[in-house]
Image (spheres, helix red, strand yellow):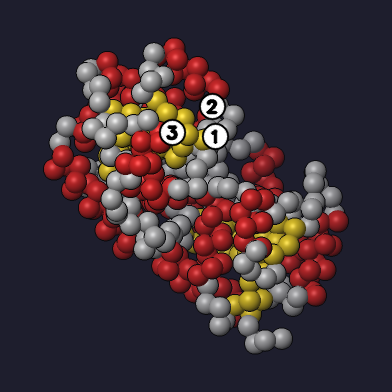
Amino acid sequence: MNGKIPVAHIFLTLNIGGMEKVGIDLIDNLDSDVYENHVICLKELGILGEQYKKRAANVVSLDCEGGLYSSIIFKLAEYFRSNHIQIVHTNNSGPHFWGGLAALYCGIKARVHTNHGRNFDWPARRILLDRFSSLLSSQVVCVSQDSADKLSKSDKINPRKLSVIPNGIDTTHFSPGERNQTLLDSMGVPSDCSVIGSIARFSTDKDQETLIRAFSALLEEGLLRARLVLVGDGETREGLEALVRKLGVEDRVLFTGFRSDILDVLRSLDIYVLPSHTEGLSISLLEAMSTGCRVVASAVGGNVEIVSEKISGLLVEDRDVSGMAIALSSILNDCEFGNSLAEAARESVRERYSIQAMAGQYQDLYTRVYSG
C-alpha cells in the first residue's frame, strides 16, 4: 500500500464520446497524492481507453460481452479485492448496476455514480433498473440540474442521494486563437466565407437535419458566402447527405467525418451550433464557448443552464428550423453582437465549467462518502 486511496472508475467502454472524455479528464485532474486511480472497462477498452493505457497504469478491460450474467460481479469483486479498492465510481447504466453489486458484495461503502444524461424517455423496465441501482450508490451525480430534476421526478430517485456536479473542460487548451485558413483551404472553404459548424456524432438525437434545413433557408435568403461544416459520423450520415443533395446545397455543406484537430476547427468557425433534441451537459458546447465561438443551441436539457440567452449565446426551440435560421442570421449580420456573445461565453465557461472546478467538487464528494 502506498498510502493513497484506490478508486475504481468503471465504464462500459472508452470509445470516442463526451462522457468518456469527461471521465478521463476527471481522472487526470484528481489529486495524485491522494488517489490511486484504476480504470475498468466492462467491455473492450475502446479508442480512448487504448490511448489512455499507453500513458497510465491500472487500465484494464474485463472483456464482458452480451447480456446479464453474474460473472461480471465476480470479475469486478476479484479486482476490487486484489487492488484494495476503497471507492467505486461508476458511469452510466450497465456499470452502475454491475459495479454497485460488486462493491456491495465486497463491502465497499463509498460508491459514487455519475449519470451523464440520457437520450429520450427510457422504458419502464430501464427506469426500474436505474432506480434499483441507485439504492446501491452512496451518491448519484447529475451533470445538470435538469438531469437531477428528471431523476427525482420521473425515476423517483431519492433527492437526498442526488448531487449536481457540472462537466468541466480544459479552458487553457480550449482558448481563442487565430482562424486556421490552411485547414479551411483543405476543406475547400474560401477565405471570405462565413463558417457555421457543428461537432457531434450523427444520430437522430443530435438533429443535424434541423441545422441543415436552417442553413439552406439562409442560402435561399441570399447568404451565398457561407459554408456549413459538419464534423462527425454515425448512422444518420447517409440520410443527411441525401437531404443535402435534395436541397441542392451539396456545394455548401461539408461532411468531414471524425477529426482529431477539434481546437483548430473551433477556432475557424464563425458560429458553433448544437441542435440536439436532448442533452445532459454538452462537452462540445462548453469547448466551443471556451474557444470563443458564437453559439446557437436548442433550448433543451443542460443547454439552458450553460447558455444565457442573448448574453453568452442564442437558444432556439427544439426542431425550430425558422427560429434557428433567424438566430444564425442575427449573429452573422451584427458583428458587434456576435463578438459580445463570444466574449461572454468564454468568461462564463472559465468561471463555471473548468475541469479544475469539476475535479475539486468530485474530490469533496469522495471525501464525504469515504468518511461517512
Residue at 67% in and 86% down: 2
Q: Nearer the viewer, residue 44 or 51?
A: 51
User: For the residue labelled by badge 2, is the local secondary structure a helix, a strand or a loop?
Assistant: helix
Q: What amino acid is found at the position of numbered circle 3 in the picture?
A: Leu
Q: Is residue 231 above or below residue 5?
A: above
Q: Position of residue 287 (x, y in %)?
A: 39, 51
- List the residue tagged with mark 3: 230
Give the CA separation, mark 2 to mark 1.
6 Å
Q: Quadrant of residue 269?
A: top left
Badge 2 density bin: few <14, some 14–19, many ≥20, Cα 10 Å:
many
The answer to whether 328 appears left or right of 306 in the picture is: left
Q: Label 1, on which residue?
A: 233
* Image location (x, y in percent) of residue 241: 49, 21
Q: What residue is drawn where x is 26% and y is 31%?
A: 193
Left or right: 173 in relation to 278: left
Residue denoted by label 2? 237
Task: Say whether marks 2 and 1 touch (CB < 8 Å).
Answer: yes
| Category of crowding for the residue at label 1, using alpha-carbon neighbours closer than 10 angstroms: few (below 14), some (14–19), many (at least 20) | some
Residue 322 image offset from top left, x and y in percent: 30, 22
Who is closer to the viewer here, 42 or 156?
A: 42
The N terminus: image quadrant? bottom right
The x, y position of residue 362, in whole percent, is 51, 68
Residue at 21%, 36% in the rendered image:
331
Q: Is residue 338 visible?
A: yes
Q: What residue lies at 54% left-to-right and 55% top-to-bottom?
A: 21
| Horizontal relation, residue 78 to residue 167: left or right | right
Res 137 quadrant in image? bottom right
Can the viewer see residue 321 in this picture? no
